[in-house]
Each structure stands twice: as C-alpha cells, then as structure tokens.
Amino acid sequence: MASLRAFLATPVGRFVGIYAAVLSVGFLVLALRPVNDHVVNPYTTFVAHEARLALNLLGEGATVTGQVLSSPRYSVAIFNGCNGLEAILIFVSGVVAFPAPWRTKVLGIVLGFAAIQVFNVVRVVSLFYVGIHRREWFTVAHVLVWQSLVIVFGVVLWLVWVRRYALAGTQR
Amino acid sequence: MRSQERSADLRTFLRRLPLALIAGVAIWVIARPIYGPFLCSAGQGLARLFEVPPASAIVLQGEDALLGRTDMRAGSGWLKLPLVFLHFNLVPFLALVLALPHPFAGGGWRRLLVALAILAGSHVASLTLQLKVFEAGSMGPWSQANYSDLERNVYGTLRYFFDIPVTFALPLLLWVGSYPQQVLALVGLGHLTAEIGGREAHR
C-alpha cells in the first residue's frame, strides 16, 4: 500500500491514477442505460452511416437498418466495442490526464475524435470486404488485427498529441 | 538538441512499431496452444472455488471455450466463446513493449513478466465472469432458482467492466506502469525519470 502511494505521488503515478479514474468513470457512464439508448446507440448508427457512405463511394450499394450495414454481398452488425467509442475514450482519458493547458486538451480531443472516426470507418469498410472475400478470416481480422490496431492507434495519436501540442511550448 | 533527440526517440518507436506488432502476433500465435488450455483450466478452477458440488465447466474446443455445467442434462445449452476475444490484448501490449528502446534493460524482463501475469489474471477473471453470467441468466428456470437479480446485475456489470474497459485499457496502463522511464522519455519528459529513479532507489 505504501509503495502504491509512493508510485501515485510520482508524475507517472499521478498520470496513471487520473487516467484510470477518468477512464473508469467514462466507461461507467457509457454503460448506463439512458446513455446507451440516447448516445451510444445513435452514435453507432451514425458510424454505420459513415461506413455506408464510404462503401457506396466504392460502388457497394450498401444500406443501413438500425446498426446493421448491408449490401447485396454481405452484412455486418456494428455493436458496442466496434463503434470506436472505446478508442475515443482511451485517447480522451490520456489527454485529460496529461498535464497541459485546457485549450490544448480541447484541440487534442477534437482532432483525436476526428482521426479515430476516420480510422474506424477504414476498419469497418475493410472488415466488410474481409467478410465478402475471406469470411473465415473475419473473426481474426475483426478481433486480433483491428482491435489491436485500434489500441495502438490510440497510443500513437496520444504520443503525437503530447509531442506536437502539449509539450510544444516547453521544448523550444 | 535535446528536443531533436526526443523526436528521434519517438521516430524510432514509431518505426519499430509495425515490426513489434508482427512480433506480438507471432508470440501470440506461438503461445496460443499452451495459453488456451491454461485459461480454460484456470477459469474453471476459479469458478469452482466456492461451488458445492463443483459443476461449472469450461472446456476447450479448438480455438473456442465451451461454457456450461456438468450437472445439467446432456443436450443442455453450452455457450461457445472464441478465446481470441479475451486474450487478443496480449498483441498490442507486447507490440508497445517491444517497440520501446531497450525494453529488457534494467529489470525490464521482470517487469514484463509481472505485467503479463496481471494481464493473464484479467483473462482468467473475464472468462470466469462469462461463465457466471451465462449460468446466472441463460439457463432458464435453473438460473432463476440459483441466482438472484442482484447477482445477475453484479455479474453483468463485472463482465462489461472486464469485456471492454479492462480489455482495452489494461494493456496501456501496464505499459505505462511497467516502463515509466522509457514512456516518459518517449513523450519528451525524460527529465522526470530522475525523480522516479530516485524514489525507487530510496525504497
């Protein structure tokens, strides 16, 4: 217990502590039924429509019903955990926990949100094509490849934000 | 100059990351045949810890785990769960560690093993919770007779917690917590590592 307190007193410990706290509260809020019904589900439908637009640019003729993205060749349901909200929350928690001016944090959150949106659309569209062409690889591509990439992408985005924006003033 | 050195650190990390991801997948592929049986037997052991008679069962079937009970009629429902959903986060964790400069220097191996043990513990807990949620809510009258609404809610909440927040965030927390000096150097706050080093030496 004493060593945990000593760790939490270090700059890294403070960051890890705030990060874990913001993340836990964020995930708890997302799990609440009213938030799920009025925020998460509409957001997931929005992600499905983004992917539909991208697929239709590629001539797929996709449609969306609820959170199900379909074309004549394949269909996928987008669930919680696949809508990018987790990656956004992980990134936002890292930004909030890092000691930086609030203006820089807001900029990071806005830019990070947009970047993760684009990344997630690429992910959904690529998985759609994996489903069409290599259905047996879908689970591996969905979970092992893309979930891993989402986590790593969130970290890279955060590192870039810290270096380019949060610490920009202090490095000169 | 120092700023340029810091940028070089980050560039090196980003350059190493794709290879580290491939290495992470390779280690995952090699470890999977041993790790799957370990997860199933540890998860079943944990589920049976306070159970009389011990009948909760987790059976490995290929890449999946079958969750159910041995004291139910043959043909009763078993839940099939791809184990990759539980342990895929080994890959991003290993990738982030392997992409760091000198990850095994200065006790790095020991910290990696501790972090992997914590990650494995989260996988076992997650698998056990999947089984408990299945037992508490999906076995019809048996579930109603043996689990209260409170237990269903507690297990359901814990499963969500392990399914999403723990799965996605634990690798990052372990990465930062296990390699604070390297991560701080990476973000350009290497000067703070003296403070951490000092405290660790003091203890």
Image: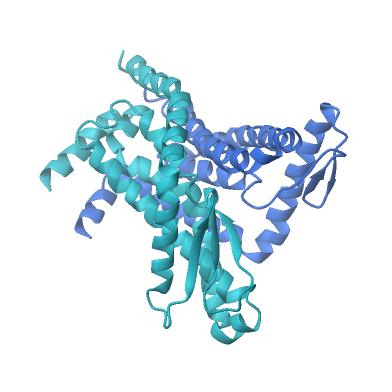
Depth check, front residue: B3 or B156:
B156
Residue B11: percent from the left, percent from the top?
A: 42, 19
Left or right: A46 in relation to B64:
right
Left or right: B187 in relation to A130:
left
Q: Residue furthest top?
A: B1
Eyeballing the image, is A128 above or below B63? above
Q: Residue furthest front?
A: B74
Residue A156: percent from the left, percent from the top?
A: 48, 31
Eyeballing the image, is A28 above or below A15? below
Residue for point 33% across, 16% down: B5
Q: Residue furthest left?
A: B202
Residue for point 60% across, 32% down: A111
Residue for point 56% across, 43% down: A87
Eyeballing the image, is B34 above or below B127? above
Residue for point 43% across, 77% down: B54
Q: Chain B colour?
A: cyan
The quadrant of the rendering that contains the N terminus of chain B is top left
Left or right: A50 in relation to B149:
right
Depth check, front residue: B183 or B68:
B68
Depth check, front residue: A131 or B12:
A131
Residue B82 visible in the snapshot: yes
Q: How is the image coloured?
A: by chain
